[in-house]
Amino acid sequence: MTPRTTTLSRSGSHARTAQTTRARGTQKTSQTATKTQGQEESVRFAALGGLEEIGRNMMFFEYKDEIVVIDAGLQFPEEETPGIDYIIPNTTYLEGKKQNIKGIVITHGHYDHIGAIPYILDRLGNPPIYTTNLTKEIIMKRQEDFPNSPKPAFIMINGGEKVSFGNYFSATFFDVVHNIPEGIGMILHTPIGNVVHPGEFKFDYGHDGKPKGLDTWKWVGEQKIHTLMLDSTGSETPGYALSERIVEQELEKLFRTAEGRIIVGTFASLLDRLGEIIKIASKLGRKVAISGFSMKSNIEIAQRLGYLKDQKSTIIPIEEVKRHKDDKVLVLCTGAQGEPNASLMRIANGEHRYITVKPTDTIVLSSSVVPGNERSVQNLKDSLSRQGATIFHYKMLDIHSSGHAPQEELKMVMKLVKPKFFLPIHGYYFMRRRNAKLAQEELNLKPEYTILADNGIVVELRKNEVTLTKEQLPSYYVMVDGLGVGDVGEVVLRDRRTLAQEGMLVVIASLSKQNGRILKNPDIISRGFIYLKENQGLLDEVRKKIRSIVGRIPRHQPLDADYLKTIIRDQIGQFLYNKTKRRPMILPVIIEV
Amino acid sequence: MTPRTTTLSRSGSHARTAQTTRARGTQKTSQTATKTQGQEESVRFAALGGLEEIGRNMMFFEYKDEIVVIDAGLQFPEEETPGIDYIIPNTTYLEGKKQNIKGIVITHGHYDHIGAIPYILDRLGNPPIYTTNLTKEIIMKRQEDFPNSPKPAFIMINGGEKVSFGNYFSATFFDVVHNIPEGIGMILHTPIGNVVHPGEFKFDYGHDGKPKGLDTWKWVGEQKIHTLMLDSTGSETPGYALSERIVEQELEKLFRTAEGRIIVGTFASLLDRLGEIIKIASKLGRKVAISGFSMKSNIEIAQRLGYLKDQKSTIIPIEEVKRHKDDKVLVLCTGAQGEPNASLMRIANGEHRYITVKPTDTIVLSSSVVPGNERSVQNLKDSLSRQGATIFHYKMLDIHSSGHAPQEELKMVMKLVKPKFFLPIHGYYFMRRRNAKLAQEELNLKPEYTILADNGIVVELRKNEVTLTKEQLPSYYVMVDGLGVGDVGEVVLRDRRTLAQEGMLVVIASLSKQNGRILKNPDIISRGFIYLKENQGLLDEVRKKIRSIVGRIPRHQPLDADYLKTIIRDQIGQFLYNKTKRRPMILPVIIEV
């Protein structure tokens, strides 16, 4: 264990060491953790995702021939990645060392922590997955959609337990509160000291409004912590999290005023919230019908594991909703983000099999709006509102709380854990930097003791220093599109973006092999550029231009098809730009027959 | 003028009338405001944009052969309209009656109120534009980019003035506070009574925190108002607007702590804010350099009109920034939304000619994030943050205030104006409905007296009733893309969206005219689907499949090219879906030579 020294001497003496090491790092090219002359062995750390975005969380620790991985999540596609299903972490480095992987610890059951599992498990040699019961069940449910992914080997863990991953790494787990049950954090015991990875968490507040479970953090603080890692998602949010107790109270108040049906849209993954809502409904004598595949299967898992035991009779099948009076029903459904095929959207569009909006409905959107979904949510609200329903959303009332500790909670954990080094994880650079600043202020740490690593950057942890190396592991996006994993790259995406902007135009010139003369009027196909039927004149001009371009090619030399294509592309492109101020993708085809 | 009756008798007796009229409306097909048997003449109202979105505001009033238009704005493109530059109001109806248009009143100089002018002016027969000095200058500046648009004929107006538009309509204008100077509202005097259109406004608060200028609203309330129209953008926001005085104070506090340069990113259109920032800089002895074409030209206009008189020496050319000490400089620039080519983005990317980020810079984003821009703003903050700058944004401090009156301000105006009818404008349906609810509660109005009209729906205003008709004027999107106005329709957009999702594949089969045999191996071009170089095997399979499809066509009958294309599209589409679970657009081409 790392012996603790006073803050002053730490900051004073090691600041220089850290700088020296960083300078040395520039010459470093080794791919493995080898012992540097005169230097102690280091534990290597790198994130393969999650440090430059919110999502696709995956990181690992390496010492000699042993590796422990934490999480394997996915990221949802962005505007810049059209047509992509998911983005997953880049596991190239780990694939080359799969025999060394002692296990993957999964901190909780959200997709940004488990979603990549079916894609990477085989590539990593199917190492054991250390996780809690509920998380295991959620992972197993998802595996059903991936018949070719190997059967995962689970090792069940619980808060308070200690496991050993091999010769060098072991971990003591502890329970954390997130917005899905059975989240865990861990103290990873490494050869250079104890590293805390708390998973994702927020504080749990009792009915007295005071944070509960601070004992855990106090206990963690007594374990001589070398490095503390903390989720940065909430690092720009001042204050404390809105207590789930308040959310519960607000929801109950709201539900009590509803005179007709209540329809609540939220994330299927907010299992705690779902549980709360079911409890309140039960208390108010309302039956709960669940709509949405993912929500249904999550609640089934929760029930199977003994959650919601007392509410068994509350839950009814969605097809039975009509048998109950409106004021005795609550519908819990997916789609609060306006996702096209989710339940609430189908309800709004009149496409739901069992639920049609009534003017007496009270519709509650109990989730924040994920950036990028604003417009869909506006449309969803508009559509529900037009059908007369009364709508409540999180901006109007305290009916949603984030699962990520905001500033004051982060600071409290820092104070209790008192680490020597701080390594903010999860989130954009500016969020991690904010988190690092909090630690600098709260723990009086010099900036060199707060580490801002990017995805793929190898960090070396030694007893008395943590250094960023210049070693960059592959960490570029691996995109999942249909059956393809990683086969859609920047070229394909760039083409998709270009096609989306101004469409394309294929021009086909059939030339005679004998004399290079054009055999027939050029064919033109265009999509996404202009409406062809109304622009025949423009197309005729393009055809004429092509004939003239081909006509100008000297006949006495063999046809250079590539050259001809380039001229067509340039000249037709310029011509269309002058005419329309648009730049469709021009695709010339030369057919020689 | 409309005689006022008591609330009780109004609500009681006319509720039925309104319903009767609405029922009658279903049979109504007339396109003009003709006198219905036994019914008094009505003033017709319709919005051509702005009632189902935020943006492209345009509405008009019509009585007999006279029409008055209010605003002609644009809307920025959405995810659903890839490649589009702008969306403008549909003026089809007005184009057919251009000789009747007596004028266009422009309430203020924001693009969602002026942006469509260069596109529609000619189509509407270049009617006179009634507006204030500053708004005129902004419109004229923009006209420079549209040499083919006619020279607008302006009639200058000021708050307090009354103008007559013809025989039936006149207006008394009054000044309103927005976040651009010289915004105006109006009482439109019509044959059926006074209608208030206040433009867009918020309250101005004095240093004592009390709203100023309530006298105007009181005066409006004394004019016997038939119908009040109010902007609904802020109708879901509780409370009062954050006073610009507070924003000013917060900015000043922040600026005082900055030790190096200050770089402020905001909207070029927030002219009031720009003025405030320049004043504070001047007070703190900092020179202000402006970067960004639109911001520069807006400030030049403001200066020319006598705004910012005392700060003349404060403003310096951007190329002179380096001549001043860092703590004596403030850079005011566009691009706080992360727009690719705006100044702040170029600064962040190291592409700005005069400004490079320094770790001592304080960068302030003084604007809210427009929905859809979240990701770009994250990237902007990340990039600036990586270069060491300290960043402040509106979520961290009170350094931005919306220009739209929130609930309590809307309610105060309702109370002061005391209209007989309420017609919420500007905003999505759920926002307008919320606004209508506020009026129902605040003014004790029955729902029939609060009118929710959609774009294009003709509303008939009579002395004692306002009714929604079934008459729907064309109000579908008119899209501007390059030089084309309205030539990009749903088909082209759908193709763009499809191309963006999975790309496309053109397969070209060259067949012999004589015997229908395939002449050469089919050509395949694909973009945005898969990376062709790495998927030659798949392409070979596609070629084989096409040969086999063509081979199966009976030789003894003439080739049905359309039929062949359909089979190729279906079978190749299905084949690729089975292989990849993607559905690229398949474009078969049959060349007969």
Image (spheres, coloured by chain):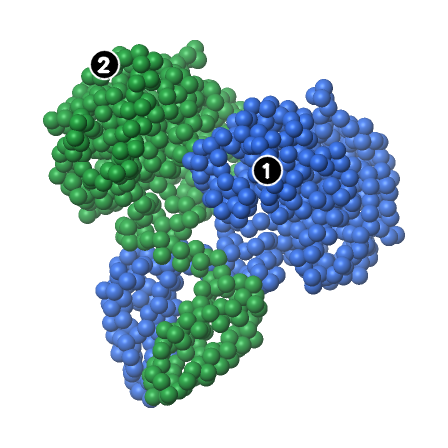
Chain colours: A green, B blue
Note whether residue B366 is visible.
no
A333 horizontally vs B434: left or right: left
Residue under circle 1?
A: B323
Q: Secondary structure at mark 1?
A: helix
Question: Callout 2 environment at 10 Å: few (<14), some (14 to 19), or many (20+)?
Answer: few
Residue B381 at what x, y percent from top left?
47, 36
Which residue occupies the foreground of this view, B388 or B570? B388
Residue B383 at what x, y percent from top left?
44, 39
Asked if the residues shown at circle 1 and circle 2 are in contact, with their CB atoms under 8 angstroms apart, the answer is: no
Which residue occupies the foreground of this view, B437 or A515? A515
Note whether residue B294 is visible.
yes
Residue under circle 2?
A: A3
Residue B587 at what x, y percent from top left?
39, 68
Q: What residue is rendered at 55% in x and 61% in y? A: B489
Residue A555's place in the image compared with B419, above or below, is below
Q: Amino acid at mark 2?
A: Pro
> What chain is tagged by disc 2?
A
Q: Which mark is residue A95?
A: none
Residue B151's place in the image compared with A294, above or below, is below
Whether discs 1 and 2 lie on one chain: the answer is no
Question: Callout 1 environment at 10 Å: few (<14), some (14 to 19), or many (20+)?
Answer: few
Tell me how far mark 1 sits from mark 2, CA to CA. 52 Å
Q: What residue is rendered at 61% in x and 41% in y? A: B320
Q: Secondary structure at mark 2?
A: loop
Q: What residue is rendered at 84% in x and 51% in y? A: B165
Which quadrant does the N terminus of chain B fall into? top right
Which residue occupies the foreground of this view, A130 or A262? A130
Q: Amino acid at mark 1?
A: Arg
Which quadrant does the C terminus of chain B fall into? bottom left
Q: Nearer the viewer, mark 1 or mark 2?
A: 1
B91 horizontally vs B42: left or right: left
